Amino acid sequence: MPLTMTAIATPAGGKTTTSSMATTTMRFEKRASMASVSSSSQVGASKAVSVRGSVRCGAQRARGVMPVMAVSTTRQSTMTAVTTMRRSTTTTAREAIVARAGGGAVEINPNDPPEEEVFDMTQDGQKRRWGMVIALFVAFVLCNLDKVNMSVAIVPMAQELGWTTTQKGLVASAFFWGYSFTQIPGGWLASKYGGKVVLFWGVMLWSFGTLIAPMCAALGMPALLASRFLVGLGEGVAPSAATGVLAKGVPPSQRSKAVTTAFGGLDVGSLLGLLIAPPIIFRLGGWPAVFYLFGALGFIWGAWWLMKFMNDSSTDMKEEAVVGGKKALSIPWGAFIRNKQFWALTVAHFTWNYFSYGLLAWLPSFLADAMNVTLSKSSFLSILPYLSTVVVTALIAPLAGELESKKVLTRTQIRKYSQTICFGGGAVMLTAIGMIVNSTPAAAVTNQTIAAVVGLLSVTFGMAAFIRTGLFCGHQDLSPKYASIMLGVTNTAAAIASTLSTFFTGYFLSKTGGNWAYSLFFPIAVLQIVSVFVFLVWKSDPVDFDKAKTA
């Protein structure tokens, strides 16, 4: 990359005048960043050199004198100067810059050593690293398998055990009690003990809770609720633990691809669970088989993770290469609370989970009860909306990047328009579904009615994919430094919304005589409209929460 060198003379009086300027262009093959090197000479005292731009010394000046030639400089001397200055910053204050990458802001430290000095970039190292990413992908597949299994199994369970709609809502919401409880603690545990260990025990806990569900159901409602609570506790630590594993084990140049791959397991898990759960129930011994099989898969994954990755430090960054050491992180909670954009994210995340988990938990039951669709067909039809999400997600990610890179839209506009399409368009579609349901008694439902409802649901979930370029980029836009802790906070509010959605849908069904429009679709539409207006305050400008904390 080009390097510009400028000599500036500073008189003793304090005013800066330019005495000479020399510009030379060179190409650096190892560093993909722009560096600007300037040399200042102090008249009557001493001389010092400072390197500014992507490599910047904050608190300590470089030792010695490096004269800058007014006419030219050699490649060797320049590279030596940059290398010397980079090394001299290991004990100095370091500043972070924000780079636009992957549709969101990413914190990059310009003084960090090259990736090959921090990570194992050999072919064997890459193979182990991506094997670990695939293992994370499988963990998230299992995560949503054990979440979706109850959505499907609850239909025959309710018939066999004689549950009311309120009891069905209670069972569906029990998972989120535990899930809400471990959002922020999960991040703390991952920081203290390491993401690999925390993820292992999280999977073990939720797999155990899944495995014992049939036995607990036989013991009674309290025992079943406790088992689902355990599943929620285990799954609650998974996002923070996996984020810690990826942050420590994947170099920045590969991080976007790795994060997309790993967390993509959630969507695959939802689709797979809705697809295979009904055949398992019908052919392998009834609804208990779903819990036995999915629970056992978790323990198989645990054995794989334990033997291959959990204790393999070769997939981690080399700690001795990390400059500055670890520091206790002081969270600026007050600055978060006073920030309007933070509250916009919180409201949007709350609404997203009320929508997504409410429909995830109740969609098979809605199709079976209101549309007279059999269990196997209802699960198959439930797949179509989620398939729509996967397809649209693959399209909008590059589209958003293209619009921003070509300056067609600003980053703030992309976030706002994404949220408007996601929630505004979704509210229109859900209202239309509610009106169809209210005007069509179950006995009068035809194939055309089912096609219309499923079609509108597919459009709704397709527009919901815009959440990926809206809400889920917002935390990094505001503050790369505190993005993970902010996500933990907003996801806690979202987990509470999931609990409320799954429980109150069942409660409203019991109070309205089984009216799905007023119990499920209209409440979500109202929340979405409110969220659209709240998000109008959004700005993607980075916020210095540390400075705001002391203000």
Image (cartoon, rainbow, N blue to C red):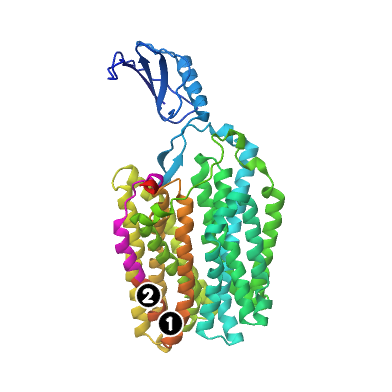
Answer with the quarter of the image where residue 96 lies. top left
| Left or right of residue 283: residue 347 | left
Q: Position of residue 291 (x, y in %)?
A: 65, 71
Residue 541 on the magenta span: yes
Please give the name of the residue rendered at 51% of the width and 46% of the height, measured from the top-left corner: 329
Please give the name of the residue rendered at 35% of the width and 57% of the height, measured from the top-left corner: 418
> Badge 2: few (under 14), some or many (20 or more) residues near its Cα, within 10 Å?
some
Q: Which residues are magenta?
A: 527-547
- Residue that badge 1 annotates: 508
- Asked if residue 406 can be seen in this view, the reply is yes
Whether residue 503 is situated above or below residue 543 in the rendered picture: below
Labelled disc at residue 341: none
Please give the name of the residue rendered at 58% of the width and 87% of the height, measured from the top-left corner: 162
Residue 95 on the magenta span: no
The reply to whether dot 1 and dot 2 touch (C-beta < 8 Å) is yes
- Residue that badge 2 annotates: 523
User: Which amino acid lies under the numbered mark 2 shown in the image of this protein?
Assistant: Pro
Q: Of residues 12 and 106, which is closer to you in this image?
A: 12
Q: Position of residue 468 (x, y in %)?
A: 42, 56
Whether residue 483 is situated above or below residue 31 in the rendered picture: below
